[in-house]
Image (tube, rainbow, N blue to C red):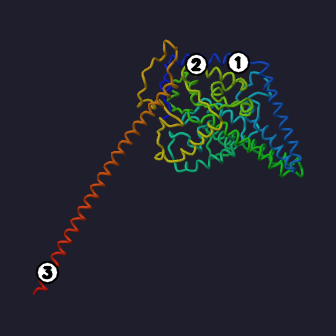
Amino acid sequence: MAITDIQGYTHLTAADIETLGKELDSIRRSVETSRGERDARYIRRTIAAQRCLEVAGRAVLFGSRNRWAWLGGTALLSVAKIIENMELGHNVSHGQWDWMNDPEIHSTSWEWDMTGPSAQWRRAHNYSHHTYTNVLGKDEDLGFGILRMTRDEAWRPVHLAQPAANLLLAATFEWGIALHDLGIEKELAGIPDKKLTSPPDLEFARKVSRQVAKDFVLYPALTGPAWKSTLKANATANLVRNLWAYAVIFCGHFPDGAEKFTIEQLDGETQGEWYLRQMLGSANFKAGPVMAFMSGNLCYQIEHHLFPDLPSNRYSEVAVRVRELCDKYDLPYTTGSLGKQYLLAFRTIHKLALPDRFLKRTSDDAPETSSERKFSDISLPERLRVDPETGKRFGLRSALQDAKASLQEKARHEKEVLREAKVALKARARQEKAALREAKRALGERATHEREVLQDKAARRWGRRVAR
C-alpha cells in the first residue's frame, strides 16, 4: 500500500527530518545567493547555441534530396529540438532563470517547441506533479493515465495492452504530454472532458495548429523541390526528440527505488517530510557533462525535485552535497546507468501488464515500490540510532540492507526446508516403489505356483482317465 508514514519508513525521528530539512534549506540559500553572471552567461550561450544548431539544420535541409545532407540536417535539427525541449523549455518554464528579470528568458513568456501550450504544461507539471510527487491519485504523471506503474493500482484487462501503449507513448511523447496537460487543465478548471470549445481547448488548438503548420507545412514549403525530404526530416527530428525525452522522464520516477506514496502522507506534511518525499520518489542516472546537458540536467532528477526552480547548471554541485546528506542520514540515493534505470522501468511496465495472480510480491514489498509495512514482518537487528563511537546513523539505507539480508536468509531457510522435504519425498517414493516391486514379485511367484498346481491336477486327472 505505498508509503503512508514517511517517518516510519525512513527510520528517522521527527527531529532528524526537521534537521535534514534545515540542511537542505541551507543548500538552497547558498545557491540562490551565489547566482550571478556566470549562470546568466550559461543560459544565454545555451540559447545561442541551440538557435545556431536549428538554423544550420534547416539550412542544410535545403539540399535534403541528397542523402548526406538529409542525414546531417536531420541530426542538427534533432539535437536542436532536444536542447530546446530539455535544457531550455523545461527549465525556463520551471522559473529557473526568472531571477535574471530578462523578459525573453522568463517562465511567463517562454513558449517551447512542443505541441502543447507551455502555460498548460506549467500548471499541470509544476503544480500537480511537483507538489504531489508520486502520490497515488494526486500525481497524474504516475503512468500518465495509460500505464500501470504500481501494483497499488488495481489491474484491469486493458493493462494487457500496456507494452504496446508504452511504445506508442514513446513515439508520440509530445502529443501524450500535450493531451495529458490539457486534461489536467480542464480538470483544475472544472470543465467537462467532452466540452471541446472551452478556453483551454481553444488555446490547445491554436498551439497545435501553429506547431503542425511550422514543422509540416511552412519549413518543408520553404525548401521548394526538397519539401518531401524536409518534411520527413522534421518528422524524424520530432521522433528523435520524443524518444529521448520519454527515456529521460521515465528514468526519473519509474526505476526500482523510486517510491510511491498514499494521500495520507500529505496530512500535516512538514517541509522536511516534503523534501524526503521528493528524494525518495525520484531517481537519477549517471551522466557525463554532455549527456547531462542533453538531458536538461534531469540526470539529477533528485536535485531537480528538491529545488525545481534553481538553475539547472548548478545541479551537479548540489548533487555532491545531497549525497553527503544521504550518507549522513543513512538514506538511499537512487541512481544507476541510463540503460539500467530504463530497463528497470521497462521491466515494471511489462510485469504490471499481468494480473496480480502472476506476481509474487505485494505493493508493500515490490521491487518498483514499497511501504513502511515492508519491515513489519522482518526482525531487524537492534542498533543504536547513532553510534556513539563512529557517529554513524541508522536509517532507511541500513534498514533496507538488513531487510534484504533478512529476506535472503528467510528465502534460504525456506529453500532448505523445501529441499529436505523433497529429499524425504524421494526416499518415501523409493521405499514405496521397492515395496510395490516386492509385492509384484510375490504375486508373480504365487501365480506361478498356482498355475503349476493346476497343471499337476490336470495331469493327474488325465492319467486316471487313460488308466480306465
- Amino acid under label 2? Gly
- Amino acid under label 3? Arg
**Badge 3 vs badge 1, beta-carbon distance below 8 Å:** no
> Against 396, is 54 above or below?
below
**Badge 1 vs badge 2, beta-carbon distance below 8 Å:** no
Circle 3 residues within 10 Å: few <14, some 14–19, many ≥20: few
* Residue 32 numbered tag: 1
- Residue at position x 42%, y 21% in the image: 382
Residue 298 position in % (x across, y down): 68, 31
Furthest toward the top, the residue is 389
* Residue 21 numbered tag: 2
Residue 277 position in % (x across, y down): 56, 27
Q: CA distance from mark 3 to mark 1?
A: 121 Å
Q: CA distance from mark 2 to mark 3?
A: 110 Å
Circle 1 residues within 10 Å: few <14, some 14–19, many ≥20: some
Q: Which of the 4 image quadrants contains residue 93?
A: top right
Circle 1: element type: helix
> Against 321, is 48 above or below?
below
* Residue 461 numbered tag: 3
Out of 124 and 278, give the one closest to the viewer: 278
- Amino acid under label 1? Glu
Circle 2 residues within 10 Å: few <14, some 14–19, many ≥20: some
